[in-house]
Image (cartoon, rainbow, N blue to C red):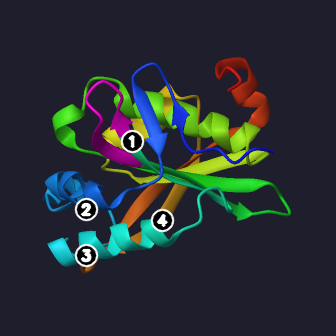
Amino acid sequence: MEKRTDFTTSRLRLRPFRPDDFQCLQEYALKEYFWRFLPLERQTPDSVRLFLDKRLEEEWGIDGYHCAVELIDEQRLIGTVRIAVKDAKNCSGDVGYALNEVFSGKGYMTEAVQKILQVGFNELCLHRIWATADVANTASWRLMERVGMQREGRLRQHKKIGSKWHDSYLYSILRSDAEARLPKI
């Protein structure tokens, strides 16, 4: 199979990271809305640089894809989306995403997650894809519902953020669920 260089939708390109993505990543990663539901310390330019350096070192398509989400018309990074194989024997993986809030409310992340789910099922041959979201992160778990993921339960005190434990919702989508909702890539 020919190695993929990116994945596209009508408005977005999901592509490998580039060194010049640093500024666009900083625009949102340094803001509290980005990391407030994540078990991360307050982000700094150094932590953003470390994130980008790790992405640049990853081999594209080996056990998943960690993508820069770029607006095709503007050739501008607006967020990230990733899919990773977590349990190869059971064909299970997880998905995660982040968006610069300047671009929220336009359906971009819904479009990006739909595409990365297609990639998970069609390219990585996954059977089940799951994700978690802090129960207070309504935008995240509503996005999961929009793309056809089903809530499986509540993970009590799942993540420690700062000094407090937070509950998360667990969502998943099966290949059979997605076949009716997601067109083939």
Q: Amino acid at mark 3?
A: Ser
Residue pictured at 24% horizontal, 32% vertical? 104
* Tag in front: 3 or 2: 3
Q: Is residue 174 magenta?
A: no
Mark before the other along the chain sequence, 1 or 2: 2
State whether residue 42 appears in this view: no
Q: Quadrant of residue 7?
A: top right
Q: Tell me whether circle 3 and circle 4 mark residues in contact (CB < 8 Å).
A: no
Q: Which residue is rendered at x = 48% and y = 65% of the image?
A: 156
Determine which residue is flagged by label 4: 156
33 over 164 or under it: above or below:
above
Q: CA distance from mark 3 to mark 4?
A: 28 Å
Residue annotated with mark 2: 35
State the residue lying farthest toward the right.
89
In terms of depth relative to the viewer, which is nearer, 46 or 152? 46
Q: Quadrant of residue 148?
A: top right
Q: At label 1, which amino acid type do we have? A: Val
- Checking the image for residue 69, the label placed there is 1
Name the amino acid type tagged 2: Trp
Measured Cα–Cα span from mark 1 to mark 2: 18 Å
Instruction: Tell me where residue 116 sits by quadrant.
Output: top right
**Quick one: label 3 or label 4, which is nearer the N terminus?**
3
Q: Which mark is residue 47?
A: 3
The part of the chain drawn in magenta is: 70-80
Give whichever of discs 3 and 2 has the lower sequence position: 2
Disc 2 on helix, strand or loop?
helix
